[in-house]
Amino acid sequence: MEENNSKRPIQYHEELPSVHDDMLISYLHKVIRFAVKILAVLMVLVIIWGIGDVIHVLYTRLNQPPYLLLSINDLLETFGAFLAVLIAIEIFINIRLYLGTNIVPVKLVVATALMAISRKVIILDLDKLTPDYLLGIGAVVLGLGISYWLITREKPDILR
């Protein structure tokens, strides 16, 4: 019996084909794809909730004396709320790409991780942290920065 799998177009990840010789595996792949769709819906709800949080943070900070002014801590908290929403949007885009293509968006995943660690660095309270914690965050930033640079750098003509 000749396999016809190589002739059908791939709409999803190759590791989760919608058609499989084993009916159980085919069913499980469908369940996983459905679970990812549920995650996408939940991420949209998180984004909407996050926007509500940004509005709430701004409203409460601007309605406290001195009115219509933000302290440095208020600004940092607001930036953290904004960045949390942007990170949620990036995660949604990752989920969307996972559902709609057969590639893993490594560059986007690393960029999302860089944004997340950047948010952490922006909202750090340096008075409450140990040197080990700061070294760990520095190592993560360095590792992600190098990873992103390696992924995005121009390849020499010999490697193309």
Image: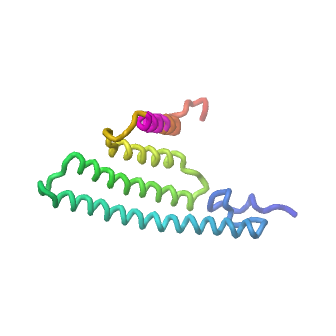
Residue 42 percent coordinates (x, y): 47, 67
- Seen at 37% across and 39% down, the residue is 129
The stretch of residues the image draws in magenta is: 132-143
Query: Of residues 92 and 159, which is closer to you in this image?
Result: 92
Query: Of residues 122 and 104, which is closer to you in this image?
Result: 122
Residue 60 percent coordinates (x, y): 21, 61
- Seen at 47% across and 38% down, the residue is 140
User: Residue 46 occupies which quadrant of the picture?
Assistant: bottom left
Asked if residue 103 lies in the magenta stretch, the reply is no
Q: Is residue 92 above or below residue 136?
A: below
Query: What is the basis of the colouring in this image?
Result: rainbow
Q: How many marks overall?
A: 0
Residue 23 percent coordinates (x, y): 76, 70
Residue 145 makes an appearance in the image: no
- Seen at 41% across and 53% down, the residue is 87
Quadrant in which the N terminus appears: bottom right
User: Residue 125 occupies which quadrant of the picture?
Assistant: top left
Residue reaching furthest to the right = 1
Horizontal relation, residue 66 to residue 2: left or right: left
**In terms of secondary structure, what is the magenta stretch mainly?**
helix
- Seen at 18% across and 51% down, the residue is 70
Residue 104 makes an appearance in the image: yes
